[in-house]
Amino acid sequence: MTLSRKQPSTSVSCADPDAWTRVVAGSAAFELHSASVRYDARAALLEASLVVDPGESVALVGPSGAGKTTLLRLLNASLTPSAGSVCVDYKNLAQLSPVELRAVRARIGFVHQDPSLVPNLRVSQNVIAGALGRASFFGSARAMLWPRRTDLERAARILTRVGIGDKLFQRTDRLSGGERQRVAIARALFQDPSALLADEPVSSVDPARARDTVALLCELSRERGLTLVVSIHDIALAREFFPRLVGLRAGRIVFDERTQDVEAGALTDLYALAGLERVETAREIER
Amino acid sequence: MKSSAELPLLARPAWIGPRGTAILLLTAASIAAWFLLDLTPRALIPHAGGIEVAKRFFAGALQPAFEYESEVPPGTRPILVTVLEYARRTVVFATAGMSLALVLGIVLGFFASSAWWRGEHIGGASRTGRFLARTIWPFVWLCTRGLITFMRSVHELLWAVLFLAAFGLNTFGAVIAIAIPYAGTLAKIFSEMIDEAPRDSGLALRQIGSSPITVFAFGLLPRALPDMCAYAFYRFECAIRSSAVLGFFGFPTLGYGLAQAFENLHYHEVWTYLYALMALVIVVELWSGAVRARFVA
């Protein structure tokens, strides 16, 4: 890992000066500053603040509907906050030009809950699709229909790394659920990302595969020095693989600690229905 | 707050809801239509002379002609060669019309679908992208929808009559007559297939910064392609029938020979042409079945 000191490139800096010393070259940093997201009247995320340093691995835990997906979508700039700000690599996304924003999105790999692949295309095409964020339309057409040898070789190397090197020219819908998940990860890696975001990457595979998938995501980000933010409902997996846990409930970040400091009570509270009602009541009293 | 013991009294759904009402109304409408047209089984019983004609016509079905039913000048092509020639031209007209219709249908289908721009304004899109998604694309979408509705509201035979009046017996007129309504229908169905196809892969592309047209071409279109292909084959089959019927207006397709045989009351020949048409449709059906099987595999 290289240590470097990045200078903020926009006038508004979101950076914590201490964090700079830990910057891993080429990997992304994320910051949320009291970011809220409202869908109509409902708040999906309320005043969330979070700093993820370059190269860090973080798990977002919490019951469904807690705001994990919303938070991830803020980080990859596919959602703009109703209030507060989002910074990626110390740049406030609200101040970026469309071209800069597109470049930011192209460097963030996203692994979806359902693999979001095109089932009737070959695995190679689905992997190469990872580069379409940076290409022009004609460049995209060329890459998808007549892929260059170098692209194919790169796709093959990545697929081998994620354990399905022999599937390069298979039709994607012939693959098992776990293999498709790996294709989705390979597509994210083909983006040459500076960060990997994964939204419940293991909810569509069986428990044994789930452990493998999480382990793979962690290994890959360590190897490549990628920042990794994963939302996951399986507490045991989160505790085993991630050094830092961020707990969400009802749109709020309720804890953000090193894994060994997170008390078991905090986790049970997170999922307890009674706890949820307490929050609701508290909010009613506030009003 | 109510205690859990007092369950709220839920309104029972009506015995016959809106769906039931709709079904009843539709049934009533179809019965009314039959009454208004005075459709009774008696109408199917032909008059005395009619029975004779009907007998001869259906007897032809068992014995299609392999030779002309009347004297022909020496040197006339054998009927089977004539049928083959008409069949060939039927396919040529259908193919020409369909190829034009496919290109137009895909282009119009793109503008008549909304999956590639709808939702673009929700998150992260560029200012230009949001502007286009809010103003220009909905307007283009509406205009295209109007245009394709107009194109397919006039039947291909009506278009053929119009072009016949305008340009005379012009091959290009016949091809355009098929292409216009077919392009309209293809565009409508294609756009609906694209809009109804799963959007997750398109969304994934959009999230990594792809432009709407890339999202359309490589995220949405491939999901709808198998259905679009199957539908295009079905329309090709329809185009063959339309092209055959154009023969009744004088274009050299199966319908031309059919009309002649009819006029001469050569019912055995009529059936030769009908079987040729059926054979064409079966060939297309087998072909499309084979292609669809590859898609599903």
Image (tube, rainbow, N blue to C red):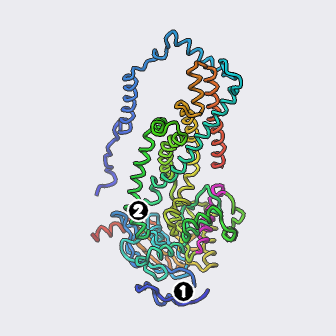
Q: Secondary structure at mark 1?
A: loop
At 59% from the left edge and 63% from the top edge, which residue is drawn? A141
Q: Is residue B58 left or right of residue A101?
A: right
User: Which amino acid type is marked by label 2?
Assistant: Ala
Q: Quadrant of residue B165?
A: top left
**x and y percent of residue B87 in the render?**
64, 34
User: Which amino acid type is marked by label 1?
Assistant: Val
Question: Label 1 marks which chain's residue?
Answer: A
- Which of the two marks, 2 or 1, is nearer to us in this view? 2
Q: Which residue is mark 1?
A: A23
Is the residue at mark 2 from the same chain as the one at mark 1? no
**x and y percent of residue A101 in the render?**
47, 74
**x and y percent of residue B183 in the render?**
50, 46
Q: Within 10 angstroms of label 2, few (less than 14), some, or many (20 or more) residues?
A: many
Q: Which residue is mark 2?
A: B133
Q: Residue furthest top?
A: B48
Can residue B227 be seen from the camera position used here?
no
Q: Is residue A229 left or right of residue B83?
A: left
Relative to B74, is B249 above or below?
A: below
Labels 2 & 1 near each other (Cβ < 8 A): no
Q: Secondary structure at mark 2?
A: helix
Q: Within 10 angstroms of label 1, few (less than 14), some, or many (20 or more) residues?
A: many
Stretch of the chain drawn in magenta: A171-192
Between B261 and A137, the one nearer to me in the picture: B261
